Amino acid sequence: MTALWIFFLMAMLLYLAISLALQIGIRRLPENEADFLPAISILIAARNEEDNLPRCLEALLKNDYPTSLLEILVIDDRSTDNTRHVAQSFAQHHTHIRVITLEHRLQGMSGKASAICHGMDTARGEIILITDADCVPSPQWIGSMVSGFTENIGMVGGFTMLSEMNGKYDGLISQVQNLDWIYLLSVGAGAAGFGKPVSILGNNFGFRRCVYEAVGGYRRLGFTIIEDCALMKAMIRQTRWRVRFLLKPAAAITSRPPLAWRAFTEQRKRWAAGGKEVSGFGKILLISAFLRHVATVLALVLLTPIWPALAIIALVSLADFLLLMHASGRLRRRDALVYFPFFQLYFLLYSLFLAPVVVLPTTVRWKDVDYHWRFGQRTNKVDDPQVNAL
């Protein structure tokens, strides 16, 4: 057996083993629900979101959670459009909506972490829910997220579906990205089911106020571009609280996919750069996916005979399909599986394309701010036109 065959088989076996473990982890996710009605604060960090914010706030106003126990804080993060005026117009008609206006980013924090930190300074809720201005929560989102905070749970994550939300049928690019998000969140949910959470999505998660205070909040955590995961990691490291994912439609939200190539690549570069900061188990997941795709390309180009390799590649793809089938079934979105073949090609291409971002010096632009990384996991420089660089 040649060295190439050995590498191919080892890469595929590693990926298969991890995929099986993730599927078991998803099946281990608890389904019991908490039975309480705590005070809730919903924090929305918004920068130049005048077009998206109305849809988000209108959806939250349609939620069935008691208004007397609810406050919605819109943190206008130095917007240069009409975001603040849009938020204020809602606040004038709904007393449980408040607007916080920021003039400067807190030194030593990314923009969103700074905005959330300001929001936490005035938030009154026992449970804090975070979403983004370009997201549309389901009508039962608040109550469903709250139901996940059972006795030992300090942080809850929901799923995000992607849709163009234009009243028309979504195109292929949107559909494939939607399936990709379901896959990535399924990986996170499976890892959490084993008690090894690696990620949580910042546009749909919540945490107990006592958790935030126990870890010192974002002022103590320092700079990170993945502030959601940083808070999760601090909670796991410093407290006994656990993370829980909710695999049900009521806890899901809808967001728009990036359709332009530049917007897509900047989003994925930001995610890949965040991979520099994930836990050890998270790095194993990233490495296994990368090796699987490298092995696939090498096998298709160099291995002979090709048929055994194709059979193994098909088996690995089947593992992905089974993971997605279970998760999408619980989310009642198995219709998305129609796009699975396109997703597999898409997954291979962007995994290889973005792999250098995880290890090499990187610059990512997000909300008009440039973030620079050296080798390793430390941010080297932040170019923010409104404040001095770190």
Image: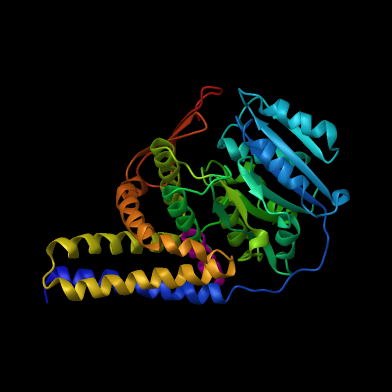
Taking the view exactly as shown, the residue that stands out farthest to the front is 168
Q: Depth check: give the residue in front, 126 or 47.
A: 47
Residue at screen point 72% across, 41% down: 57
Q: Position of residue 268 (x, y in %)?
A: 42, 45
Give the mark count.
0
Q: Is residue 34 above or below residue 213?
A: below
Q: Position of residue 110 (x, y in %)?
A: 55, 37
Which color scheme did the rendering employ for the protein? rainbow
Residue at screen point 71% across, 56% down: 141
Decide whether residue 79 is among the magenta residues.
no
Residue 332 location, quadrant: bottom right
* Quarter occupied by the N terminus: bottom left
Q: Is residue 228 above or below residue 54?
A: below
Decide whether residue 187 is among the magenta residues.
yes
Q: Position of residue 380 (x, y in %)?
A: 42, 36
Give the dominant element type of the magenta stretch: helix, strand or loop: helix
Q: Depth check: give the residue in front, 118 or 137.
A: 137
Report the side of 318 relative to 111 (left or right).
left
Does residue 155 appear in the picture of this structure?
A: no
Residue at screen point 13% across, 68% down: 303
Q: Position of residue 323 (x, y in %)?
A: 46, 70
Taking the view exactly as shown, the residue that stands out farthest to the right is 68
Q: Depth check: give the residue in front, 237 or 332.
A: 332
Q: Which residues are magenta?
A: 183-194
Residue 115 location, quadrant: top right
Residue 236 location, quadrant: bottom right
Does residue 352 appear in the picture of this structure?
A: yes
Residue at screen point 19% across, 73% down: 6
